[in-house]
Image (cartoon, rainbow, N blue to C red):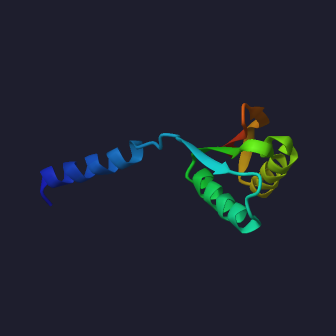
Amino acid sequence: MDFGKFKFTQKQKLKDKTKTHQQKLKEIRLRPKTDEHDIETKINQARRFLEHKDKVLIYVVYKGRELQHIEEGKRVLLHMLEKLQESCKVEKSPSMEGKRMSTTLVPK
């Protein structure tokens, strides 16, 4: 084997080992009247993000008269947190920020 080729392959292996994943913040946007199947799809998407070691920001956006029924959005968020509890930790619990309720999840 050529020594130059050997050094090159060694350098490539070392380069692959030193690569680290840069943690990103992924967002998932919902509405209070989001259907159950759509919520399940978003849960699977969030689970995929968490497996890839990214943070996930889930927020429920309220429009118009939906602000009078904040408990509907809170129900959706708590349902998602319940389904994702085995694969993540809650960094920031659900809270209202203007016209949206949000929570942040980090991988375990």
Instruction: Please tell me which residue is depicted at 78% across the width and 58% down the height of the picture.
Output: 83
Residue 62 visible from this viewpoint? no
Instruction: Give the quadrant of residue 80.
Output: bottom right
Q: 43 or 66: nearer the eye?
A: 66
| Foreground of the two, 32 or 44 | 32
Q: Looking at the rendering, which quadrant does residue 15 occupy?
A: top left
Q: In which quarter of the view is residue 105 placed?
A: top right
Above or below: residue 87 compared with residue 64: below
Residue lying at the far front in this picture: please name it: 64
Q: Is residue 91 above or below residue 10?
A: above
> Can residue 27 be seen from the camera position used here?
yes
Please provide percent x and percent y for residue 16: 36, 49
Q: Is residue 47 left or right of residue 79?
A: left
x 81%, y 55%: residue: 79
| Residue located at (77% from left, 34% from top) | 96
Residue 47 appears at what percent x and percent y? Answer: 65, 57
